[in-house]
Amino acid sequence: MLGKLSWDVIPFDQPLPMIASAVVALAILGVLAWVFLAGHFPYLWREWITSVDHKRIGVMYTLLALLMLLRGFSDAVMMRSQQALAFQAPGYLPPDHFNQVFSAHGTIMIFFGAMPFVIGLMNLVVPLQLGVRDVAFPTLNSVSFWLTATGALLVNISLVIGEFARTGWLPYPPLSETAYSPGVGVDYYLWAVQISGVGTLLTGINFVTTILKMRAPGMSYLRMSMFCWTSLAASLLIVAAFPILTATLAMLTLDRYFGFHFFTNEAGGNMLMFVNLIWAWGHPEVYILVLPAFGIFSEVISTFSSKPLFGYRSMVAATLFICIVSFMVWLHHFFTMGAGADVNAAFGIATSIIAVGTGVKIYNWMFTMYGGRIRFATPMLWSLGFMVTFVIGGMTGVLLAVPPADFLLHNSLFLVAHFHNVIIGGVLFGAFAGYTYWFPKAFGFRLHEGWGKLAFWLTLIGFYVTFVPLYAVGLLGMTRRMQHFDVSAWYPWVLAAGVGMLITTAGVVAQIVQLVVSIRQRAALRDATGDPWDGRSLEWATPSPPPVFNFAALPHVEGEEPYWSIKQRAREQNRLRDEPDYEPIEMPRNSPTGFICAFFATVMGFALIWHIWWMVALGALGALATFVVFAWRDIPEYVIPAAEVARIDRANRSARREALVTYTGPRP
Amino acid sequence: MLLRVIVRNCAAIRLGCLGATILLVGLLAGCQGGVLDPQGPVGAAQRTILLNSVAIMLAIVIPTIVATLGFAWWFRETNTRARYLPEWAYSGRIELVVWSIPILVILFLSGIIWIGSHDLDPMKPLDSQQKPLEVQVVSLDWKWLFIYPEQNVASINQLVVPAGRPVHFSLTSASVMNAFFVPQLGGMIYTMNGMTTQLHLQADQLGEFYGRSAHFSGDGFPGMQFVLHAVAADAFDAFVNSARSQGQALDKASYQELARQSIDVPPSTYRSVEPDLFHEIATQGVPPAPGPQAGRPEPSVSPATGG
Ligand code: HEM
Ligand SMILES: [Cu+2]
């Protein structure tokens, strides 16, 4: 009846996960109880859960990402403290637990932390920057988000019911095959990643369509903002790469569930095929993460230098170059598996060629600052921290792309330091820059600068104090994923990394405090005009937060920096543009499709993990039925009357007029 | 102007240099055992390539970092002496330079990659007057089996080789993937069931060198370590003789026993080895080693039940 499920699978005898999950469960229940008792549920349901508004979905993605970053971060704290205690000692986490922790850490950080963060910012910003009202497929967008949330939920359920994978964030066979991992851990991994992967693929399709097909009048490709370009590149990579992941994991699933032999030791299975395929997705994946971050930095550096982006066309070229070459380098993840010298050399060279595109970008950002008037607001600090840090991470990456050097460094903590160097210093700093930069757009008030700067410095210092020792100890031959170790030369470095973790923790706390303080002081931090940073791209032409329809009248784009030219003209003439002719606007109706579909997907995923076949059928049928019902809907849209559009736009115009009158900066 | 910016940032740079020096001194002092302290020709050559590549890249990385910070500081909003160029967004000449610098560096590095990959191909025999010692390596859950086919002995979690003589390793795995890694000798390589990889190494001096698995292989992974003893030729013979005179014989039956999962296995030796055992393992003539379910009726589903 209940497949493999029984009371034994709940680790009652292990206080750590039990207490942790009890606290989390209580917190969730508390929030839910409060929501229902205080009567907030209808609001949440109407305005958020069933919303198909790209801005709302973007906010929910970001919230999910922040929560999962916290979860992943607590895993990191456990790993660092375990290793600090485990020199010639067992530490406090037994191997089976420690191995779950690092596997969950990687999985959560990549799939449920970094990915939703960049996708959330893309959702919030891309339609605004394109000057349109929504993405191409708004309901599909909601489905994407809720499927991602399903994956995140499944990973967290594994904390209490059963176990998570103990195979690392990429479950290399044969270790991940039933013979060596008979438990449900790998199955949790597989279904969580598969289900959220569907969501990601749909996002990719949605954004490729949106960017290629739905730009404001006059916005040719070469007038799109850099963030739109990098989002397009990332979405193209998603569309091209995620099917590989899905197929690869599907094969592993067939191995595990039906005794196939794609990757097993026996019966002609080939584990190297898995390694090839997973990295054919995995390397593009790192660029899916970092390209949007590059876009954010381009926006931020140009805005806070009060200058256009230097070498725009060169930046576009570099982005597309990276996009294409990132599919031709995957073998650098296994130089040490004994491919011949020609193969290793070819992939090593291809890999270092990617660094050319990245190098060009760094120089263009530098020259964007040249001749600027740089304001060191928090987003700009993250960007500067990124430029310095990422150059170092890129350098160690190229070093690892030299096969004879990789023979010494592969799978050591040097490698771990490299990819944290680029993922924290690149993706995360970018996401935090974007978060502080666009927060006022999403909520109508800025984040507190003081706490933001403190968070930046603590995170930056914490990063270096954690990962410079890991580079060093990697050079001393320490390998990754060790539950305990016996070599005394490694010990001081491991301790130093632990100290870095403490500093980083302070940074995380500062970030949380910043949010709380900002919410409490929101009146003082109010962004009345919708243009708090003296921005240059179209999202700043809308009120903060923007109305559902974004633009009262779609803007006509006449150059690379559409909003900047509108603003300059207004400053020149000391008056706003004429009021547009307000017309009624059609917007897509809310739909619970995404949420209900994800509910059934959760049921199905859970049932698949535990082999509860009737429940699998139930979940699959439910999800299918949801789609059918959605497909048969008769009224897909509703109309916002012209008077309402006019009212909202006039309010914003008057705020902007006031700002224009009191403006004291340079006028053209 | 730029110069002045750089001078102004001197303090920061000096601080950075100080940090780097401390790190370097720390590394060199605590270096024994690391990849920067090689004890054989392969490791030494790889270290040279590593350091050369870093040096080449630092030549542009350091100026880039300095210029980034310098530009950011000089063009700060409050600096009234800095020129403001609100429209300046393109310069063909700068674009040219911006693309050329990384391309030139990568061209240079590509040369190193191509030549280095061929010179240090793990399959390539080392230049030496002496015939290489043959060692067959099998990674098991969770210990290393080293077979000396010419001497017909084997050892667990310890590797004895004559110093100054090349060693030719053939490697495979009895179950899951691992990676054979002796940091001070260089040249990590994977072990995979059903496949054989090759590696040539040599220890120049007498000494004891730490080795371990570099690829995560399950619960017993931290204990998959061994000491490589590089000894004089006669000491090696003595080791072989003493191994021959004691311990079990490694035949199919004792191999089955050995292949079971076990953790933190102390070093030991086998007096003899069934001929062709390595070949049988590598070609799955003996089946892959069992996983955790061996001897356990129920597949474990929870950390509570272990496994
Ligand atoms: C300058 C560009 C880069 C180069 C040349 C580069 C090169 C490499 C190489 C050669 C490896 C494999 C090393 C090994 O396994 O021994 C590697 C690993 C890795 N890189 Fe990079 N990298 C670059 C940028 C990035 C970026 C931007 C990201 C992410 C945003 C990233 C994320 C990773 C990750 C996650 C791994 C290790 C995955 C694992 O083994 O679990 N890299 N990189
Ligand atoms: Cu890669």
Image (spheres, grey):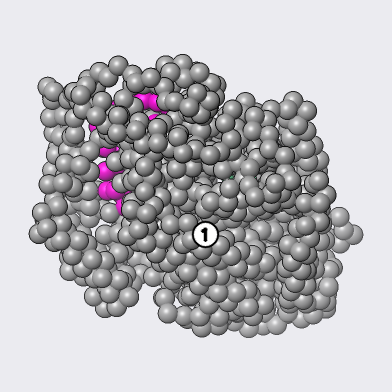
Give left or right: position of A635 versus B88: left
> Which residues are the magenta region?
A128-152
Question: Taking A264 as reference, is A201 above or below it?
Answer: above
Question: Residue B1, image x and y in percent?
Answer: 81, 46
User: Numbered disc 1: what chain?
Assistant: A
Q: Nearer the viewer, residue A121 or B21?
A: A121
Say which element carries label 1.
Answer: helix
Q: Indicate yes or no: mark 1 CB to ligand 1 under 8 Å.
A: no
Give me the residue at 67% from left, 77% from top.
A489
In the displayed structure, A571 sits above or below B197; it is above
Q: What is the chief secondary structure element of the magenta stretch?
A: helix
Ligand 2 lies in quarter: top right
Mark 1, residue position: A453
At horizontal 58% and vertical 51% (from top left) the residue drawn is A376
Q: Is residue A187 left or right of residue B45?
A: left
- Say if the magenta span includes residue A129: yes
Q: Position of residue A592 (x, y in %)?
A: 17, 38
Q: Is residue B147 magenta?
A: no
Q: On the rendered structure, is B217 left or right of A36?
A: right
Q: Tell me the kind of residue under disc 1.
A: Lys
Specify the quadrant that holds the C terminus of chain B. Answer: bottom left
Residue B19 visible, this orientation: yes
Q: Residue at x 16, y 41 (%)?
A: A46
> Where residue A580 appears, x then y in whole percent?
33, 19
> Quadrant of the rendered structure where residue A102 is?
bottom left
Total number of numbered labels?
A: 1
Front-most of residues A515 and A266: A515
Q: Residue at x 74, y 35 (%)?
A: B98
Residue B79 in the image, given as x and y percentages of width and height: 69, 49
Depicted B78 relative to depicted A203: above or below: below
